[in-house]
Image (tube, helix red, strand yellow):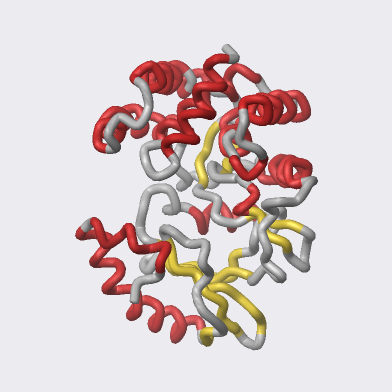
């Protein structure tokens, strides 16, 4: 039986091949790392299978990743952070795209906590370390978004108006070559990717890392519907993050529009388009 969150992978030959190989990959990694399963897979998983294990008597998590572009260098990012504000990487198997991670207990998400934005801002500045060279450059990722944006929009049935598409493409042309200092970025930092832990009160997971300017890091925080999905809340987050962290508001706004729409042709297209509209109306 396919894990519910991975069902979308059955739509492609690559996804079906990976799902067929998954039981074998799981057994191979458990043998190689000497770990044993300690429970069912975690429910919040859409491009990986992650489940609790025990490694030498210590609680851990085994994560097997579908080989997509966004998670390709997750292990490199986690090694660079070395547990400072993020889940600690215990071992990696690049050939199998497998990670052995510390288990965060109790592991509940930050979503719903009144101080969620405070927590995220405190963690964010700790993540801005020099990026390992293998990590994909934001400029290169932006080129890929620009090249695929219209096709994705068409394939999704044009879920939002062309004016939004044009605005995103304009930002993707102007912003990449004019970036400031490059750091390691977590391009999916929202409350569901921050978990309660024992080593620290909160730690981030699932980085989907990039190497680029700090202003880009604002994007997932501004669009995070868990923090309030309305025009006032979205603009207030943009203002607060940029003000407190000394970031260029216009560049942050542009990156948020561009990435939100580049990621916004799936099931979340409607609310992501709303975020982009609110930001563009504020120009």
Rendering quarter of residue 214: top right
Quarter of the picture containing the N terminus is bottom left
Seen as rendered, the residue at the extreme left is 13
Question: Eyeballing the image, is 115 above or below 240?
Answer: below
Closest to the observer: 133 or 225? 225
How many numbered marks are there?
A: 0
Residue at 57% of width from left, 35% of height from top?
Answer: 223
Seen as rendered, the residue at the extreme top is 283
Question: Eyeballing the image, is 24 above or below 19?
Answer: below
Q: Is residue 92 visible?
A: no
Residue at 79% of width from left, 59% of height from top?
Answer: 201
Q: Is residue 76 visible?
A: yes
Quarter of the picture containing the C terminus is top right
Closest to the observer: 275 or 206? 275
Residue 92: x percent and y percent?
49, 68
Residue at 34% of width from left, 27% of height from top?
Answer: 146
Closest to the observer: 135 or 193? 193
Closest to the observer: 32 or 164? 164
Residue at 38% of width from left, 48% of height from top?
Answer: 69
Residue 54: x percent and y percent?
59, 84
Question: Eyeballing the image, is 235 above or below 15?
Answer: above
Left/right placement of residue 56 relative to residue 115 reads left
Residue 194: x percent and y percent?
66, 54
Residue 164: x percent and y percent?
41, 21
Rendering quarter of residue 238: top right
């Amino acid at each position: 039986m396919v894990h519910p969150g991975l069902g979308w992978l059955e739509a492609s030959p690559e996804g079906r091949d990976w799902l067929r190989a998954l039981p074998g990959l799981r057994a191979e990694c458990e043998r190689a790392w000497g770990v044993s399963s300690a429970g069912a897979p975690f429910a919040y998983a859409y491009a990986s299978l992650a489940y609790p294990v025990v490694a030498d008597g210590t609680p851990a998590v085994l994560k097997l990743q579908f080989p997509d572009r966004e998670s390709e260098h997750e292990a490199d990012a986690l090694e660079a952070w070395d547990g400072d504000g993020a889940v600690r990487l215990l071992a990696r198997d690049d050939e199998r795209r497998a990670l052995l991670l510390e288990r965060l207990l109790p592991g509940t998400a930050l979503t719903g906590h009144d101080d969620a934005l405070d927590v995220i801002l405190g963690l964010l500045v700790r993540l801005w370390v020099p990026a390992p060279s293998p990590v994909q450059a934001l400029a290169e990722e932006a080129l890929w978004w620009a090249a695929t944006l219209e096709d994705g929009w068409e394939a999704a049935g044009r879920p939002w108006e062309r004016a939004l598409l044009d605005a995103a493409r304009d930002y993707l042309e102007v912003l990449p070559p004019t970036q400031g200092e490059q750091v390691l970025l977590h391009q999916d930092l929202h409350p569901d990717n921050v978990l309660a832990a024992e080593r620290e009160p909160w730690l981030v997971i699932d980085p989907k890392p990039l190497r680029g300017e700090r202003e880009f890091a604002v994007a997932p925080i501004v669009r995070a519907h868990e923090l309030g999905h309305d025009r006032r809340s979205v603009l207030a987050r943009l203002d607060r993050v940029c003000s407190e962290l000394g970031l260029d508001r216009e560049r942050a706004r542009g990156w948020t529009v561009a990435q939100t729409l580049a990621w916004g042709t799936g099931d979340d297209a409607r609310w992501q388009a709303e975020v982009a509209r609110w930001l563009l109306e504020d120009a």
